[in-house]
Image: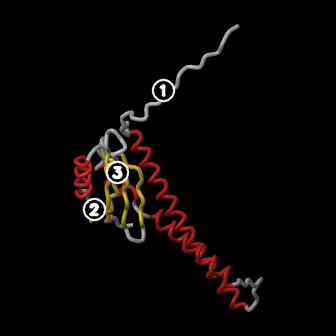
Amino acid sequence: MRMNTMAGLFLDFQKPHRRIGISGMVLLLIGLAVTTFLGAHLFSRMQTLNIQETRYAIATRHSGKSQHKVSYSAAELQKLRAEIKDANSVMLQLSLPWNGLFKSIAGSQQTQVALLSITPDVSRKSIKISGEAKNLDVLLEYLQKLQKADSLRSVYLEKHQIELRSAQRPVRFTIIANWDLAP
């Protein structure tokens, strides 16, 4: 009788961070360029649609014959306004020059710093960068590099915390910066 044995499973959670190669960076830039192009195309189509809808409304008003009347309740109007506001916000985000912003952040990247999230606030032209550094010196060096980036202004460390539960004692941080990019 033959018995099946399972091989042991080895998970290495502390494997050193692999650097993004040239091909990865090129793919990222291509993706950002395509996203920017599609956002600009969407914005153009939405403007064309708005112009055509306005012309149609004027034409039907002048002809005195409306093909159909649409009436909305106050709640429906409020919901429609919120959807339009959200759509405009998405169009604004898509039309921003993300390539320059991400190049500034990527150019400051260090091997001993792991970025966990990048959260832009389009209305304030600010960005929140969260990550983890090997130690406080590495974090301060990374902060100085970001402060020297051409497209970033008012870069400061919002908060940091040394992870005492981990043997390596990494430093979790949040950095806030304003960007200086023309959309």
Residue 17, percent from left and from top: 37, 37
Place residue 173 in its image quadrant. Answer: bottom left
- 1 or 2: mark nearer the eye: 1
User: What's under tag 2, amino acid-wise?
Assistant: Val
Q: Quadrant of the C terminus?
A: bottom left
Residue 126: image x %, image y %? Answer: 36, 65
**Secondary structure type for disc 3:** strand
Q: Camera-side residue: 103 or 122?
A: 122
Q: Are marks 1 and 3 in contact (CB under 8 Å)?
A: no
Q: Earlier in the sequence, mark 3 or mark 2?
A: 2
Alpha carbon of mark 1 to alpha carbon of mark 2: how far?
A: 41 Å
Location of mark 2 (residue): 155
User: Distance from label 3 to label 2 (Cα)?
Assistant: 17 Å
Three-letter amino acid code at the position of disc 1: Phe
Front residue (pair 14, 18) = 14
Give percent across and percent down for residue 32. 45, 53
Neighbor class of circle 3 (other Cα within 10 Å; few <14, some 14-19, many 20+) is many
Numbered mark located on residue 10 in the image: 1
Crowding around mark 2 (Cα neighbors within 10 Å: few <14, some 14 to 19, many 20+) is many
Task: Residue 172: give its label.
Answer: 3
Helix, strand or loop at mark 2: strand
The label on residue 52 is: none
Q: Position of residue 56 (x, y in %)?
A: 66, 81
Q: Residue at image x 40%, y 56%?
A: 118
* Quadrant in the picture for residue 64: bottom right
